[in-house]
Image (cartoon, rainbow, N blue to C red):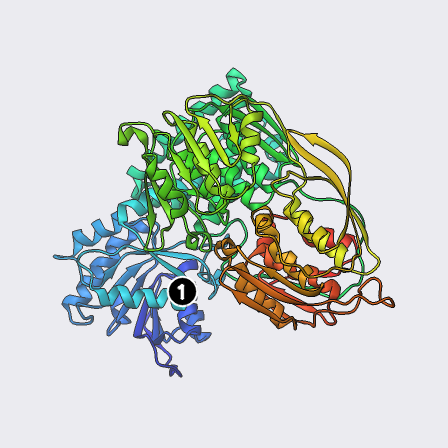
Amino acid sequence: MQAVTKLTPSSTQPLFQKVCVIGLGLIGASLAQAIKDNGLSQRLVAVDRHEPSLEEAIQQGLLDAGSSVLSEVISGSDLIVIAVPVQAVQAVFIDIKNAMDSGLLATDCIITDVCSTKVNIIDAAKAVFDTLPVGLVPAHPIAGAENSGYHARRATLFVNHSVIICELPTTSHLAIKKLSQLWEAVGATVMPMEAAHHDSILAHTSHLPHLLAFNLVEQLASHDDNLDMFRYAAGGFRDFTRIAASDPKMWHDIFFANQSAIVSALDEYSVYLNDIRQLIIDKDSTALMGLLGRAQAARRHFGHMLASTPYTDTSAMSASYNITPSNTVSGTITIPGDKSISHRSIMLGSLATGVTKVTGFLEGEDALATLQAFRDMGVTIEGPDNGNLTIHGVGMNGLKPSKTPLYMGNSGTSMRLLAGILAAQAFDSVLTGDTSLNKRPMERVATPLREMGAVIQSTGQQGTAPLSITGRDSVGKPLQGAEYDMPVASAQIKSCLLLAGLWSEGTTTVIQPEISRDHTERMLSAFGYPVTVDGNRISVEGGGTLTGGDIAVPADISSAAFFMVAAAISQGSELTLKQVGINPTRTGIIDILKLMQADIRLSNEAHVGGEPVADITILSSNLVGIEIPEYLVPLAIDEFPVLFIAASCAQGRTVLTGAKELRVKESDRIAVMAEGLQTLGVDCTVTEDGLIIEGKGKTDSRDVNNSHAVFGGGHIVSHHDHRIAMSFAVASLRASKQITIEGVETVNTSFPGFAELANQIGMSIDVISA
């Protein structure tokens, strides 16, 4: 075919003067279309053996010229994209070298490819060129589609997909920069990677699955009853083997081109296949459930870990609440399980000897992060299934090193408590989290752990995550028991040190300035580990054991707090919350609301799994402002955002002091709540360690339910803090206009189903997903 030319002037400043795409299959044609649509090249030409595709591309205005002969169209190109099968690349390199030698191409022309193997591409270039061209940039877009060929092209094919670029020592920085700009301009994310590593990764994640799919279809087709095999094949077979419909010639070439990495991946897969075969033969239920459970959880977990999110995207405001004001709430509801106890049931159940069965487990994002971490360390955990878990404990010394950093999502509790456990283990470990968690202070646990002999490295001048922890095998000696006088009352710091003390030589004692949550002490005792409590001194001796048992997780009082305040501030309300945990170190919310003259009643008190529980009934109340006693602050530290809503609805001033801890939660909860309250028309003053709120409530004999509006309407930014979002949702019960709250997807970290439950009792929350 003779070269055909059709000139189309560019209306924008192009990144390249002339791009030549060699191969108009799915990837080559899609990239050509994306370059055309985004005005990235002044001229666009192509080389392909299929003349009808070239003619159609020119006719449709995609190409300025096209030919089956490279030398007819390549002259003056400053970018060449090779999009042919891997085995054909060396022949293309020969044509490119001839064009350079004849002066058709500059020697610094950028040359790239889109092949799924890289080492063989580099080897092919070495075989053709005397020295590797300075413009050679091997690349691989991780994108595709079921259909192939020119007609399957899509300009959006690469949007939100990764493109791997192999930066060679011989390549100019300008070539790498310009090619990266091209891929980013068509919507892709550029990732650098060494060529051999790329081939190994792709062998496992792409080439091996295709090989297995082809092989499974061949296996079934070879059966005498193959017709029935395919007729009754379930959806799993169809989904898995869909990729066996891919181009056999292309995959034939890839399998040979990446031979070494694919054979290695096959060998490794064979080991895993033999292992699961033996588990089935042995009917080893525990081990098989562990393998299947880890695989199921990992399928979901790694996607979030790679995106640095806690299972929901907290880096972008992808969900909002639009809330229409309502006046009253009523009914009887059950609140999800306690998050603090759910965390600890996983941790201690995993370290115990024997089986631990958990009921009422909170299937929120934070607790799931803890669960995944222990799966990553080799613990078999069945569930969660409607709040039920079965944990097959590995004993005090049975944890195994994770092959990847342990990802805590947005859970500060998970990270700080695990730091204590991991500081005592034989192996090295790394703890990381999402963007928000990685900004929160971790030296508060790292410093006292170092006093016990831990080798732990935080990040940056602020001492944040990721945390790198050196195992005891490398250190050469166990942790040493220590006495630590905590500067602030913190259940997380206390629990971290007590957990580290389980493996330490001697006694570990934590002295707290005020009472803080004692779930760790209670649960250690429930698992048979002695804990000594002498006033504010809590001690454990190292070297003991934990014994598995049954754990019933009560409803979370921190989650119940939102509904307690909702009923107290609204008109004609009566709301009962079933079997809520009323651990005396957590009832600050009840004590403070009662001081504000809230009508709260407890009934059906009992003990479940060592924790006191009760039904809590709340009625509409005429709240009054108070000075909150500082001794109650640690007992209600997580509930203050919604208490600020209650204070706004109270008559008179409410003053909070001694709450500096609120500034280092998921957000600076003092500053963020003050910002939101002011947006809704409430006067408040931020202090160094608290907040002063001028309540807008009134006591009036003609308005016994105090039902007038306190808040206006407005737009609230939650800073992706779940408690901020839920607190301002409660404010809608005393609002005059609609309230919109941005960044509410993190509510699932602690209270999955919050909006649905709120609507069930009379609120009107519309969840908007972007």
**Res 74 → quadrant:** bottom left
Q: Is residue 250 visible?
A: no
The residue lying at 28 percent from left, 50 percent from top is: 118
The one of 357 and 118 positioned closer to us in this rendering? 357
* Residue 590 % position (x, y): 69, 48
Q: Is residue 37 visible?
A: yes
* Residue 188 % position (x, y): 41, 62
Residue 259 versus residue 608 in the image, above or below: below
Residue 405 versus residue 18 in the image, above or below: above
* Residue 409 % position (x, y): 49, 48
The residue lying at 73 percent from left, 56 percent from top is: 566
**Res 189 → quadrant:** bottom left
| Helix, strand or loop for disc 1 | helix
Amino acid, disc 1: Leu
Q: Residue furthest top?
A: 282
The one of 63 and 347 positioned closer to us in this rendering? 347
Q: Residue furthest right?
A: 702
Determine which residue is flagged by label 1. Answer: 31
The one of 624 and 68 positioned closer to us in this rendering? 624
Residue 683 horizontal side relative to residue 299, left or right = right
* Residue 569 % position (x, y): 75, 59
The residue lying at 18 percent from left, 56 percent from top is: 169
Residue 487 horizontal side relative to residue 85, left or right = right
Residue 108 versus residue 197 in the image, above or below: below
How many numbered marks does the figure carry?
A: 1
Q: Quadrant of the C terminus?
A: bottom right
| Label 1, residues with CA under 10 Å away: few <14, some 14-19, many ≥20 | many
